[in-house]
Amino acid sequence: MGQGQQEKVATSLAGAVSEEISASLAPVDAELERRYPGDPGTRQPVHTVYVPGDVFAADTVRSWGDRALDALEKHAPDAASFAAVLGLTEELAEPVHARVRAKLEREPIEDLRVDFEDGYGNRPDAEEDEAAARAARLIAEAYEEGTAAPYMGIRMKCMEAPVRARGIRTLDVFLTGLIEAGGLPAGLVLTLPKVTYPEQVTAMVRLLEAFEKAHGLEPGRIGFEIQIETSQSILAADGTATVARMIQAAEGRATGLHYGTFDYSACLGVSAAHQASDHPAADHAKAVMQVAAAGTGVRVSDGSTNVLPVGPTEKVHAAWRLHYGLTRRALARAYYQGWDMHPGHIPTRYAAVFAFYREGFEQAAARLSRYANRTGGDVMDEPATAKALSGYLLRGLDCGALDIAEVARLAGLTRADLESFATPRRGDLTASA
């Protein structure tokens, strides 16, 4: 065949065959779109801070930032000393230290949950009513004044019989307070703890539906996180993965799955000395959560450490190294969020997150640039990898680890470009796989 001569194309199947197959798979196509819509493309906070309902105050966010800065000043006042504690490279030491300080001054908490569960305990009804109303007022005022964390809300008591009515009432008081103060803030997040059966998730859905109807809100306006703290939430009595059924029971309202380190460990009989987020039991639970949530738009969050960075400098440094290591371990396993229980954890949370994104962003930007421009390189990337690369860069930008100018300089891409790669249409991912 001569050069430039057109190749003869022949087929054997009638067009009706393809049409019939497409028709037969239409329900599957619809099911895929419904169950696996993909990541929502919104910012995911790097942590969640829990503050008991009776402790939460108007200055809590700023107070945590100031206490974290004080700890940094006292125990690692410069880049070299901070890097020595955490094992940061010389190249990362200065930018990480500078960005941690700036973050603590500008936005010390990304996600705050006023706790009415374990951290609050059982109180007289009138006392909890007042605390819930007060939380609503303070959060509404914080958003109005521009002093709020990007995400804020409450953790209510669970749906188990002894505390169910109390939890429902606290949620009602809190949400009603927000409505009366001007409406639900965009950053509102609710956490439902100790979920064991999908029916408890369904009950939360019905509760939120009733509230939305009572106030004329758009159906589905209020979402919630599901806290995984019991063995039954991972594996049901019939051997199925309960957590997957919980996501479906949420009817699109689930925003996250949060691992509860200590309740889950205790449920499995792990002794107190070994209850940690890197225990094999924790790894198994989070792996099941991660697989169940993949593609659904529900994010997974790691738990916390109860080793607090308090006391003499030597003890603080040891706690910092532990927290830094656990956070880096979680990030490598794609758990991009965790819990922080003390202001002293904030410096190492951000140090770990910033180091994670800064040490890899040049390579990620270069690979994404080659992919976008269809140029060669030593790695052949596909749409799914481009999605992961752009997601990595976007998370680094959102938390403050990276600046758009430096990413644009290396990748030649705008934020809009990154977002288009991070949330491709389903067909874009499968066409060249």
Image (cartoon, rainbow, N blue to C red):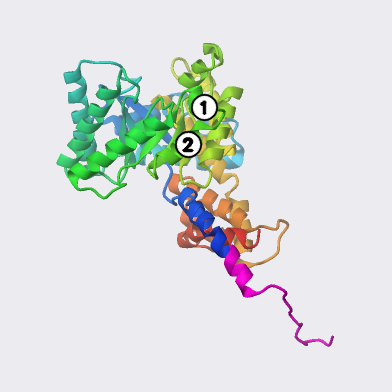
**Does the magenta segment cover residue 77?**
no
**Does the magenta segment cover residue 2?**
yes
Task: Calculate the distance from the C-alpha at mark 2 to the C-alpha at mark 1.
Answer: 10 Å
Q: Quadrant of residue 109?
A: top left
SS of the residue under disc 1? loop
The amino acid at mark 1 is Ala
Q: Which residue is mark 1?
A: 236
Q: Which residue is mark 2?
A: 245
Question: Between 286 and 21, which is closer to the camera in this rendering?
Answer: 21
Where the C terminus falls, by quadrant? bottom right
CB under 8 Å between discs 2 and 1: yes
- Specify few, some or many for label 1: CA neighbours under 10 Å numbering under 14, 14-19, or 20 or more: some
What's drawn in magenta, residue-wise?
1-21
Drawn side of residue 69 relative to residue 221, left or right: right
Q: In the rendered view, tell whether residue 360 sits above or below residue 59.
A: below
The amino acid at mark 2 is Arg
Where the N terminus falls, by quadrant? bottom right
- Specify few, some or many for label 2: CA neighbours under 10 Å numbering under 14, 14-19, or 20 or more: some
Q: Residue at x 30, y 35 (%)?
A: 153
